[in-house]
Image (tube, rainbow, N blue to C red):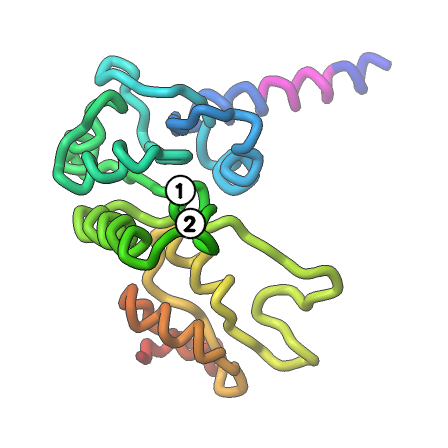
Amino acid sequence: MEEIIRKVLEELKALEEKNKMKKKMMVLSRDAASCENIINRFSDAYDVLFAKSFREEDAPDALVLKDLTPDELMLLAEGKNGCLGPVMEWLMAGKPVYLEPESLAHVKNKETCKKTLFDLYENAVKTLKSYGVLLVYEEKRQKGAPEAGKSSGRNLVTEREVKSTITKGEKTICVTKQTLITPLAKDLMKEYGICTVLKEGGKDHADR
């Protein structure tokens, strides 16, 4: 019994040390209940917190912008923080700032939103990307679909895997000579400058 207690205490101490080493990520959102995707994706590397705005003294190591209103989106595209907090200062400091496009109003209402209005907000998103904002997409997997990188025994790179690579801030995807890359994945890789790395004979060879 003493041995079991000792091991449990050791594991608790190790877990406590791990949590102390975690960086802090702040998710700016009005609905913390809708942020399960963010928690699942980043909780291993970050201690995820939620707020409607933040201050410099909060000092998060990374930011996630979620559920932005059209006004907030346009202000950020103009280089203005608005009431969110010093987002621009965080970008200028080189700290990671993520945006979840699927949480934006014009994307949610794509079916009814006029094209000119939709394009206006999409251009704002592109402007934020040019500032260094990283887009994070919700991972969607259809029931019975193969795991990323695998399809009928052959390697496959899909749009979902490329989006995951972008989210992680990575610039390469490891492939083999048998890997198939879907057209949508190729387009996304070209847009974001993602390279393939050919893995052959235990060595990696960069390729585009």
**The residue positioned farthest toward the bottom in the image shown:** 177
Residue 37, image quadrant: top right
- Residue 72 % position (x, y): 27, 32
Residue 174, image quadrant: bottom left
Residue range (magenta): 6-13
Q: Is residue 8 magenta?
A: yes
Query: Which one is nearer the viewer's eye here, 179 or 108?
Result: 108
Read off the residue under disc 2. 107
- Secondary structure, mark 2, is helix
- Is residue 175 left or right of 92 when viewed as pictured? right
Going 36% across and 66% down the picture, which residue do you hit?
172
- Is residue 188 left or right of 59 when viewed as pictured? right
Residue type, label 1:
Leu
Query: Which one is nearer the viewer's eye here, 94 or 15?
Result: 94
Read off the residue under disc 1. 104
- Secondary structure, mark 1, is loop
- Specify the label residue 37 is tagged with: none
In which quadrant of the rendered image does the C terminus lie? bottom left
Going 38% across and 27% down the picture, which residue do you hit?
28
Residue 199 visible in the picture: yes
Residue 81, image quadrant: top left
- Residue 25 % position (x, y): 39, 29
Kindly report the distance in space between the C-alpha atoms of the residues bearing marks 1 and 2. Answer: 5 Å
Q: Main secondary structure of the magenta part?
A: helix
In which quadrant of the rendered image does the N terminus lie? top right
Disc 1, disc 2: CB below 8 Å? yes
